[in-house]
Image: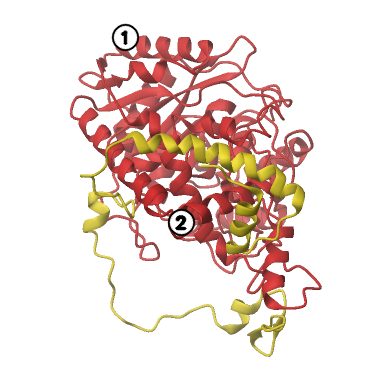
Amino acid sequence: MPITESDIEKIAELAHLEITPEERHKFAPQIAEILAYVEQLKAIDTSAIEPALGGLTAEGERTNVSRDDEVQPSLGQKLALAEAPDPACGHFRVPKVLS
Amino acid sequence: MQTYSVSEARSALVNGTTTARSLAKAAINSAEQLNESLNAFLEINREAALRRADEIDGHKQHEAALAGVPIAIKDNICVRGMQTSCGSRILGPYHPPYNATVVERLLTAGSVIIGKTNCDEFAMGSSNENSAFGPVKNPWDVLRVPGGSSGGSAAAVAAGIVPVALGSDTGGSVRQPASLCGVVGLKPTYGRVSRYGLVAFGSALDQVGILTRNAADAAIVLEVIAGRDVYDSTTADVEVTCYLDEIEKDLKGLRLGVSRALLGEGLDDQVRTAVEQAIDAYRNLGAEIVDIDLPHAKYAIAVYYIIATAEASSNLARYDGVRYGFRAEEAPALRQMYRKTRDEGFGAEVKRRIMLGTYVLSAGYYDAYYLKAQKVRTLLRRDFARAFENCDAIITPTAPTPAFRFGEKVDDPLAMYLNDIYTVTANLAGNPGISVPCGLSNEGLPIGLQLLGPNWTEGTLLRLAHAYQTAHPLKAKPRVHA
């Protein structure tokens, strides 16, 4: 699968990444090489195979993970905001949404 | 400094020949002294550690499983009162308001956390060269990589700073650095150990792992941290046994599987020889050697780099400069702030993987890449299930080569990814694996063997590791040592 620099720009846009022209230039052939490598999977017949989504073991699948709907103590507003880059009046402040 | 095991530390405390304070002090002193040459720690917290050690001495908590044992924690596992950076600038660093469940359990068992260890950014890497804070150096040769991503934890244990460190293993990040640094590295079964408080990378693959100098110490630590946790719904309700009792049993009747294909192309000759000698050693110890085949193992790297990057692109979407960590300055609007923050906060490898993951999940490509990879993962799981009908564990190399030099693979991501060829299979299949030192190369660099078992057979793996280490201890010490 040929990956062009403009593909890289589009992917970066989707991933909320701002990348420089130099990075674009460097990443395009690297990502193309990795994608060419994973192409080998196409040769395997998986038409009758279920995907292993999730990743749990059989015992994990059987484990009951539900709990009673009870109020539990939580972090609270002060602690939750303690690491925020720009907290304001009990909220997370961000730059304006519409430019 | 004389190295000691977990049980030696406890007996010394109980006998009164040492105190938790003096163990903590010695560990902190050597961590500080050796950090100039190794860069293994991103934070060393002398005050917190000594306060904690005094508590243990004061309460005579010396009978607990890990009483007074100094421990280092990889910097992607949350410890209250210390930083969590994940080796990344984007976290700021972050100071978590809570402890990971594994940390809670270690503290309850009497251990003393002395600091946070350096790692590849967000655990993405096999050489530690992706840490935003400079790479960890291999204590056996500081011009060489310690492996990754838990390189700081492996180096701290190898250099005799601490007897135990925690790491995380998504594709081999505990086992591969253990191999390159000459220590034991255990990746438990998926669901054996809680990930609550472990920063997520590939959620269907991540496990917290243990680095120690010997299998007996890993057995003690696993018993402490394993088991169901209500804060992690992926932990399974499976009994935690006394692994220490299990490892003392001899190997008679155990069948060890060998895949000749995995000892073929791409493997360094010295590693092949060392692993073949280890196979002979196991035969002499009473194990039966049987041939097995994992026909889909050759696809594991391809499957892994689709699934792991897809999950990473989703998990790392949370780093947006809003709730914690770093925020880029002078962005006129929200969207630009996100993009600038992520541009300045993430390093090249993390960006590369986020983009690869975004691509394989994007419209029109999901079936061809992600779904396809998950189907091949099913085939790999079946390979293991079939192999384990005929053996109790499988022996392979841990890494294709001993420690390589800094810069050797840094511009070739695919070559770097192939370091994980023997380790990623266990993350994809969910089963446990352990790396055990099995000799030194001509250059005096450690070589590791890997043992893989069926789900929940950590006891058998530790038993095999213990038997090998008892018969063939690694006698040499790294050049950089406490």
Specify the quadrant of the image occupied by residue B481.
top right
Q: Position of residue B334 (x, y in %)?
A: 68, 77
Specify the quadrant of the image occupied by residue B135.
top right
Quadrant of the snapshot with the C terminus of chain B: top right
Residue drawn at x 47%, y 29% is B214
Q: Nearer the viewer, residue B409 or B362?
A: B362
3D distance between C-alphas at marks 2 and 1: 49 Å
The chain carrying label 2 is: B
The chain carrying label 1 is: B
Q: Describe the element under mark 1 as helix, strand or loop.
A: helix
Judge if badges 2 and 1 mark residues of a common chain: yes
- Residue B53 vs A41, above or below: the answer is below
Colouring of the image: by chain
Say few, some or many: other residues with alpha carbon within 10 Å of mark 1 (under 14 / 14 to 19 / 20 or more). Answer: few
Q: Which residue is mark 1?
A: B284
Q: Position of residue B348 (x, y in %)?
A: 68, 47
Q: Which residue is mark 2?
A: B361
- The colour assigned to chain A within the rendered structure: yellow
